[in-house]
Amino acid sequence: MTLLIRGGTVVTADQERRADVVCEEGVIRALGPDLEAPAGARVIDAGGCYVMPGGIDPHTHMQLPVMGTVAVDDFCSGTAAALAGGTTMIIDFAIPEPDQAPVDAFRQWREWGDQACIDYALHVAITWWGERVAADMATLVDEHGVSSFKHYMAYKGTIMCDDQVLYDSFRRARDLGALCTVHAENGELVDKLRDEVYAQGVRGPAGHPLSRPPAVEAEAAHRAIRIAEVVGTPLYVVHTSCKDALDVLARARLAGQRVHGEVLVQHLVIDDSVYAHPDWRFAAHHVMSPPFRPKQHQEALWAGLRAGVLETTATDHCAFCTDQKAAGKDDFRQIPNGTGGVEDRMSVLWHHGVGAGRLTRTEFVRATSTAAAQIFRLYPQKGTIAVGSDADLVVWDPAGSRTLSARTHHQKLDFSLYEGMEVVGVPAVTVSRGRVVWERGQLQAERGAGRYVPR
């Protein structure tokens, strides 16, 4: 079907202008003022709204197997919820078990991912090192369009990379022209601190942030950046949560090093007081790594986002229901790490960013879509509104509002980080490759409609 979006203000990372958009066969065919509707076209009135590139969430974990359970949102439910929030693409993670061939893990995630309602891509994690891993990295780049590899510096005894693995993998990625990403927490320190906190009698969720202080994150970010400097490769640091780590990124960028920073929307608006909540279930639902930080870190993160030190916004969507979190009721070390929010990222960032004067509309587009597309080699197929680009669009109603709640969201999760938060600025219409999939509160997601996008 041909689609004409008429009367809106088109906002990209570069500019705003009044323009109509014609979409046909999944791509943008025409862009300009006062376009005529092609024969048989469906017309959407975008008057009073902004027309923006669909959101790209570069950090999700759909149906991730972890700690004896599986994240509750699979690729179908999670991506359907994403559409309801204006996000039209995710980049998820294929994570091999220790000693598992990376290509085998990639194939498993592709099988799961092909149930997605929206387009998706995959990072692949490096969880061990050997000749097979080095060979598979080349296969993944050359044959499957994987252009980024994830390294966990936390989770000792399972998937943690030590400095030797970082060095070997960074060199291999450099030679292949791929980007390295890191989860920056010192796994050795975390392992020690978790046991010490538990031994001191702290058994509930309050022990989680005590075992992962900001210095643990900053040290790992510094170490990864220095290893990347020695190797001579760019680096992307995921979920930067504190001023300490942000300062490390800023110094490296000022020195001319190619370092990209990501921030989770929830770290911008939620602080560590949640761990002191008297309801164990509430506190446990906020257990994620890195944890939520004292409130003073939030303005530093907002400043980092405005300044471009933090370029992308993500969710790290890895959702566990209350009964899953209860595995750690008597031991915070056993609580599955992860929170939800793929449906809420765009509205929360708009409300607290654009609505509060912290971000401009073009900065919002860059942070929610364009920067991720550019860093992860999806641009200009994704992340912009231009003739020839994929017709992934959101018609954004700046005056529309909704109250965020687990009772009304489309995620399978039985909890909302933002329960009761009223946000102003919502997607009125979401378009995925030219097809209207969300319109005025009605979701029309289709299992398997998404494509794997090689990068």
Image: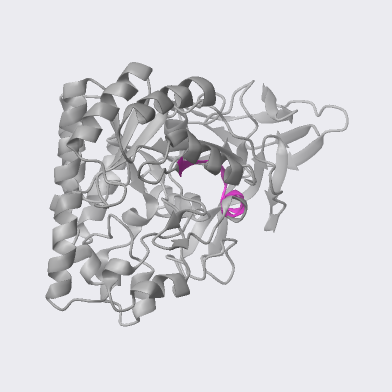
Q: List x then y, in percent, for residue 389.
A: 61, 25
Tell me, yes or no, whether the highlighted magenta stretch contains residue 51.
Answer: no
Residue at the limit of the structure toward the right, as seen here: 40
Q: Relative to the observer, which residue lies in front, 207 or 443?
A: 207
Query: Can residue 54 be seen?
Result: no
Q: Tell me the quarter of the picture where residue 46 sits.
A: top right
166 relative position to 137: left or right: left
The quadrant of the picture occupied by the N terminus is top right
Q: Residue furthest bottom?
A: 278
Q: Quadrant of residue 68?
A: bottom left
Q: Is residue 435 above or below residue 380?
A: below
- With respect to residue 57, does 409 lie above or below? below
Give how far across and how far down residue 126 sits, in percent.
35, 37
Residue located at (54% from left, 29% from top)? 384
Q: Nearer the viewer, residue 131 or 119?
A: 131
In the rendered structure, which segment of residues is drawn in magenta?
Answer: 78-93
Magenta span contains residue 90: yes
Rendered view: 281 above or below 132: below
- Residue visible at 41% across and 46% down? 314
Q: Hey, which quadrant is residue 268 in on the image? A: bottom left
The answer to whether residue 81 is left or right of residue 183 is: right
Q: How is the image coloured?
A: one colour
Q: Nearer the viewer, residue 341 or 169?
A: 169
Residue depicted at 37% across the width and 48% down the height = 357
What count of labels does the image hold?
Answer: 0
Residue 432 seen in render: yes
Left or right of 75, for residue 433: right
- Picture residue at 62% right of the left edge, 36% below the top: 392
> Which of the two residues, 158 or 352, is positioned nearer the viewer here?
158
Residue 263: x and y in percent read 33, 45
